[in-house]
Image (spheres, rainbow, N blue to C red):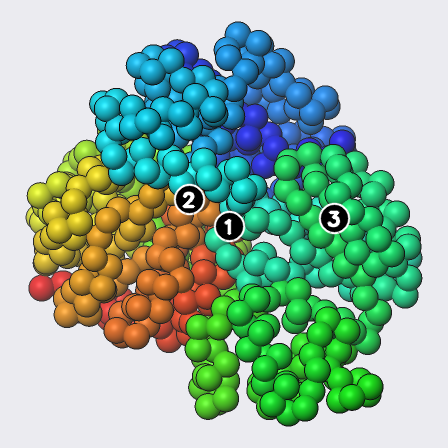
C-alpha cells in the first residue's frame, strides 16, 4: 500500500495528540510534533526511497526511535505505539480531535470537566450551553464547535493544499502509465490553488476510458469505490480523500478542463457569455448548433466568448471576466519571479540547519538572497534570541557573506509584538539589522479593537519593516485573530512598511482577499517560506499560488526585486 509523507506525519501528529491528552512528558510530545512537521514537509517521498533500497535521509529532530517508526509505518501501514494508545483510551477520543478548533488540551479539559468522550456527547453539551461554562471556552467557542460539528456531519472536511498534493501527484503518475493516455490533469479547487481541498477532480484525456477506470480501481490506495461508469468514477482513498476521475477524448480536453476546474460561479458566467453569442458550452466543447467549434484547448473556449485566457487561480467570479473584457488581466507573479526569501530560521532558534546550509539551499532553489529572522527572546519555546544572541549572529552573517558567492544573507529578526504593541527587543539592537519582521505569537483572543491597536502600535516602531503572517491563523487549528485588516493595510501604506504572505501550508496568511486589499491600497507583499529547514523552500510554490489568487503581479511582490532595489525599499522603512 502506498504510504505518503503526509500519512507518516498524521501518525506522529495523532500520537502527540493522544500523549498530550494523557498529560505525558511535554518534551516527548514536542518530539513527535516536530517529527510530524519535518516528515510532512519533506520534499521527497520517504517510502519510495526505502522501496528503492536507499537509507532514510538524516531528518532534523528524527532520531533512532522515530526513524524506526518511519520504517515500521512504511512497511506495514501501521504503528504499534499508536495502536496501543488507541486501546488504552476511549475509542471516540480520536474522533473528537478531528473537530476543527478542538486540540488535545481542549479535548482533555472537556473530558475531565464534562466527561465528554464521544461526538454525540460533545454535540449534546454544546446544544445545552454547558461548554461555555468550562474555563477557557466561552459562548463564541461553543458556537464555533457547533458549526464545526454541523460541517463534519455534512461531510465538509477539507485537507490542506500541500497534503492534497502528495495524493494527487502520486495518483497522476499512476494514471499516466496507462497506454493511450495523453494527458492527466488535476482540476477543481486544487488547480485554482485554494488553500484547502474538499476532494480531487482528475481529468484524463485518453483514446479509451476502460483501461483508465480499471487502473483507478486497482490503485492500492483506493478504500472504497463510490461509483464506476464508462467514463467517470468516484473513489475514496484510505486517507479519506474523495477522488473523482473523468475521461474525455483529446479533442474535448480544453472544454472539460475548463468545466472541471471551475469555480461554479465562473463557469456559469462563461456559459452565459456563450449563450449571448448563440453558443452552448459544456465539458465536451463549444457548440454552435450541432457543430463543435472549440474545446480542444482552454484558450479556444475563452476565445469563443471573446476573452483572453484567464488563469485558473482567478476563476472565482470576482471580477476576472470584466477585467478580461477590458484587457486588464494582470500578469500574475510566478515562482520564477522570486529573487529572495525574507523569513528564515536556523538552529540558532527553532530551525534545523545552520545559516550556511540554509543559504546554500536557497541558492540551489534559484534565490539570490535570504534574510535570517530568528525568533526573539519572548518566544522561549522556540529558543528565541536575546540582544546578545542577535549581535553574535550579526557578526556570524558578516563573516559568512565574505565566504559565499551567488547568495547574500541579510540580517534580520522575527521579533514578538507584545500585548501592548511594543517590540520584544530594544531599538538599539533592531537598528543594526537589515530587516525587522514583527509577529504576533501570543494573546490571539484579544478583542478586535485591542488586537488591531496592538499591531498598529508595533508598526509605528521606527525599525519595523514587515508584518509576518498578519492574521495569525493556522488552517484547521486556530482561527484568524479578530483584527481590522483594512486598517492594518492602510497603516502599512502610510508607514511605508510591508505585509507578508507566509507560504507555510499551515498558514497561507495573508489570504487571497487580503492580498487583493493590499494590492488595491498599493502595499507591497513579501511571499516568504518561513523555512525552518533546507527543504522548506518548497513551500514557496503554495505562497505563489495564494498570491496569484490575490491578483498580485511581480511588481506588487516585494521580494521579486534584485538585491539593490530591495535594500533601497528596506532602508526607506527606517526613520
Q: Looking at the picture, tell me which residue is in the foreground, 439 or 515.
A: 515
Q: Are marks 2 and 3 in contact (CB under 8 Å)?
A: no
In the image, taking residue 114 as reference, residue 328 lies left or right, namely right
Q: Earlier in the sequence, mark 3 or mark 1?
A: 1
Which element is circle 3 on? strand
Is residue 342 visible from the viewing direction of this image? yes
Which element is circle 1 on? strand
Q: Earlier in the sequence, mark 2 or mark 1?
A: 1
In the image, taking residue 122 as reference, residue 460 lies left or right, namely left
In the rendered view of the protein, which quadrant contains the C terminus?
bottom left
Nearer to us of marks 3 and 1 is 3
The x and y percentages for residue 359 are: 42, 50
Residue 242 location, quadrant: top right
The x and y percentages for residue 207 are: 90, 65
Is residue 389 visible from the viewing direction of this image? no
Instruction: From this view, report whether residue 328 is shown above or below residue 31.
Output: below
Q: Residue lying furthest top in this view? A: 88
Residue that carries the numbered disc 1 in the rendered image: 196
Q: Are marks 2 and 1 in contact (CB under 8 Å)?
A: yes
In the image, taking residue 362 as reference, residue 48 lies left or right, namely right
Q: Residue lying furthest front in this view? A: 128
Estimate how packed mark 3 is, as few (under 14), some (14 to 19) or many (20 or more) residues with alpha carbons within 10 Å: many
Residue that carries the numbered disc 3 in the rendered image: 234
Q: Earlier in the sequence, mark 2 or mark 3?
A: 3
Instruction: From this view, report whether residue 385 is shown above or below residue 515.
Output: above
- Tell me the distance, in whole angstroms, between the alpha carbons under discs 2 and 3: 27 Å
Residue that carries the numbered disc 2 in the rendered image: 475
Instruction: From this view, report whether residue 155 is shown above or below residue 459.
Output: above
Amino acid at each position: 500500500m502506498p504510504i505518503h509523507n503526509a500519512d507518516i506525519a498524521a501518525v506522529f501528529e495523532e500520537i502527540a495528540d493522544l500523549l498530550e491528552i494523557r498529560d505525558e512528558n511535554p518534551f516527548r510530545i514536542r518530539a513527535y510534533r516536530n517529527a510530524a512537521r519535518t516528515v510532512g514537509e519533506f520534499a521527497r517521498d520517504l517510502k519510495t526511497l526505502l522501496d528503492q533500497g536507499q537509507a532514510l535521509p538524516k531528518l532534523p529532530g528524527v532520531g533512532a526511535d522515530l526513524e524506526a517508526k518511519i520504517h515500521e509505518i512504511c512497511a506495514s501501514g501501521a504503528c504499534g505505539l499508536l495502536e496501543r494508545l488507541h486501546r488504552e483510551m476511549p475509542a471516540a477520543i480520536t474522533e473528537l480531535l478531528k473537530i476543527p478548533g478542538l486540540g488535545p488540551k481542549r479535548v482533555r479539559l472537556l473530558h475531565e470537566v464534562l466527561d465528554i468522550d464521544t461526538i454525540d456527547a460533545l454535540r449534546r453539551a454544546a446544544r445545552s450551553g454547558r461548554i461555555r461554562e468550562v474555563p477557557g471556552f466561552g459562548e463564541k467557542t461553543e458556537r464555533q464547535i457547533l458549526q464545526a460539528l454541523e460541517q463534519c456531519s455534512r461531510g465538509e472536511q477539507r485537507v490542506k493544499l500541500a497534503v492534497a498534493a502528495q495524493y494527487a501527484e502520486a495518483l497522476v503518475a499512476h494514471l499516466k502509465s496507462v497506454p493511450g493516455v495523453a494527458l492527466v490533469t488535476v482540476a477543481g479547487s486544487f488547480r485554482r490553488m485554494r488553500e484547502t481541498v474538499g476532494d480531487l477532480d482528475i481529468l484524463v484525456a485518453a483514446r479509451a476510458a476502460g483501461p483508465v477506470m480499471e487502473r483507478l480501481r486497482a490503485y492500492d490506495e483506493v478504500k472504497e469505490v463510490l461509483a464506476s461508469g464508462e467514463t467517470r468514477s468516484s473513489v475514496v482513498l484510505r486517507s479519506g480523500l474523495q477522488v473523482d476521475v473523468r475521461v474525455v477524448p483529446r479533442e474535448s480536453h480544453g472544454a472539460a478542463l475548463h468545466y472541471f476546474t471551475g469555480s461554479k460561479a465562473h463557469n456559469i458566467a462563461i456559459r452565459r457569455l456563450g449563450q449571448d453569442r448563440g453558443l452552448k458550452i459544456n465539458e465536451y466543447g463549444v457548440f454552435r448548433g450541432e457543430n463543435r467549434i472549440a474545446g480542444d484547448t482552454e484558450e479556444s473556449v475563452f476565445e469563443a466568448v471573446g476573452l483572453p485566457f484567464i488563469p485558473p487561480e482567478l476563476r472565482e467570479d470576482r471580477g476576472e471576466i470584466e477585467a478580461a473584457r477590458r484587457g486588464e488581466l494582470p500578469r500574475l507573479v510566478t515562482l520564477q519571479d522570486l529573487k529572495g526569501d525574507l523569513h528564515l530560521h536556523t538552529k540558532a532558534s527553532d530551525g534545523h540547519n545552520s545559516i550556511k546550509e540554509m543559504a546554500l539551499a536557497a541558492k540551489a532553489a534559484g534565490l539570490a538572497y535570504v534574510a535570517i529572522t530568528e525568533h526573539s527572546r519572548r518566544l522561549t519555546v522556540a529558543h528565541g534570541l536575546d540582544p546578545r544572541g542577535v549581535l553574535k549572529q550579526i557578526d556570524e552573517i558578516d563573516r559568512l557573506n565574505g565566504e559565499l558567492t551567488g547568495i547574500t544573507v541579510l540580517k534580520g529578526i522575527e521579533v514578538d509584538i507584545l500585548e501592548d504593541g511594543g517590540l520584544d527587543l530594544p531599538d538599539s539592537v533592531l537598528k543594526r539589522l537589515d530587516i525587522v519582521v514583527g509577529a504576533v505569537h501570543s494573546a490571539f483572543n484579544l478583542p478586535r479593537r485591542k488586537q488591531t491597536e496592538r499591531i498598529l502600535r508595533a508598526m509605528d516602531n521606527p525599525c519595523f519593516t514587515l508584518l509576518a503572517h498578519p492574521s495569525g491563523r493556522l488552517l484547521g487549528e486556530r482561527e484568524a485573530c479578530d483584527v481590522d485588516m483594512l486598517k492594518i493595510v492602510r497603516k502599512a501604506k502610510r508607514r511605508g512598511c510591508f505585509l507578508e504572505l507566509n507560504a507555510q501550508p499551515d498558514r497561507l496568511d495573508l489570504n487571497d482577499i487580503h492580498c487583493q486589499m493590499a494590492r488595491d491600497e498599493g502595499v507591497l507583499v513579501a511571499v516568504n517560506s518561513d523555512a525552518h529547514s533546507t527543504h522548506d523552500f518548497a513551500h514557496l510554490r503554495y505562497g505563489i499560488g495564494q498570491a496569484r489568487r490575490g491578483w498580485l503581479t511581480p511588481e506588487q511582490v516585494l521580494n521579486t526585486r534584485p538585491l539593490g532595489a530591495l535594500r533601497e525599499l528596506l532602508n526607506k522603512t527606517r526613520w
